[in-house]
Amino acid sequence: MTISHPITRQGLCALVCFLLFVQTVWPAAAKAAQPLSLISDRLSVSTSLRVRGEFWDWFEASAGDNDYAYPATVTKFGLKWSEKVFDLHIEAQNTAFLGLPSDASAPAPEGAFGLGAVSRVHNRRDNDASVLLKQAHLTLKNFGVSGLTLQGGRHLISKGSEVLSKDPTIDWIKKARILQRLIGPFAFSHVGRSYDGFTLGWTKGPYNFTLHDSHPAQGGFDLAGNKTIGDIDLLYAAFNLTRPSFAETCDARLFLYLLRGWSQLTTCRQSGIRCAQRRSPSSCHQYGWWAYSSRYPHEYGSHRSYGLGNRAGR
């Protein structure tokens, strides 16, 4: 039997203040990354705790609760083993919701009243939690080609973050306008998203090439973040030019995305007769470029998108 009680704003404020006090007074418990020298200098452990209270006062609605609050926590624990030619990284995550709204939506076109309602729809109950494998990957390095790395397994990738320029203006523009525009761990949500696949990276001076192929994990607002979405294929490639000697105040990139999904369709020659199940692909492609100069502050860029899809027959 599940018993749930609505949480008041005063109670939520008190809970969040207490947890923030713990993070402030005991920061090592909130976030740390220390080598375990008693075992081996190659082994390190990392921990983090994020506490966030959300207060939603949505637009007036015809029905449902548009004024609610709830807290959520994200706790991570990771282990990393480093060798000269490889790194092995494993990280677990616990996400917990307390007091999600159960009546914060209305029929279309009003829909969900904020992200609390979205999280409640994707999960099982008002108070819910899960433990998931956030990362488990092997990174190969120093294997014959300078600047070449290969990362395979469940890992995180953020589009546009392959290299930073160390120019405060350029990096701020990248973080605010480029990173995670289409691909990323989406850490603003309480679950986030991982990717099961590989990332190949090569960096030499101002040049960087990145190739990524994966299936995304469920995640997002869904606590079932361990599940791999095998019906979605993701391919991403980028070439980055970061402050070369002939243009030391400039940063530029070319990129390409290929996203393909599979759906189960039923095709019937006649209504209700000789129906067959088949998998049908649909895809979305995007390519473009981006450039910025801190000497002549202006952002340039362009991209094109197109999609292809199949529909069921008669």
Image (cartoon, grey):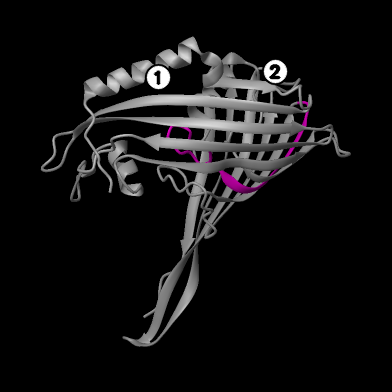
Farthest-out residue, left: 62
The residue that mark 1 highlights is 19
Residue 23: % across, % down: 47, 16
62 sits to left or right of 296: left
Q: How far apart, in angstroms, are the residues tagged by discs 2 and 1? A: 45 Å
Query: x and y percent of residue 36 in the render?
Result: 72, 24
Could you tell me which residue is drawn at 76 percent across and 22 percent down?
38
Counting residues from the start of the chain, the first of labels 2 and 1 encountered is 1
Residue named by callout 2: 248
In the rendered image, residue 167, in percent from the top left (x then y), is placed at 62, 16
Residue lying at 48% horizontally and 33% vertically, measured from the top left: 187
Crowd tier of the residue under label 2, counting other residues whose Cα lies within 10 Å: few below 14, some 14–19, many 20 or above:
some
Question: Considering depth in this image, is 189 or 29 the residue closer to the camera?
Answer: 29
* Residue 243 figure quarter: top right
Identified by mark 2, the residue type is: Glu
Whether residue 254 is visible here, answered yes or no, is: yes
Looking at the rendered image, the quarter that the C terminus falls into is: bottom left
Q: Nearer the viewer, mark 2 or mark 1?
A: 1
Residue stretch in magenta: 183-205
Mark 1 secondary-structure assignment: helix
Disc number at residue 194?
none
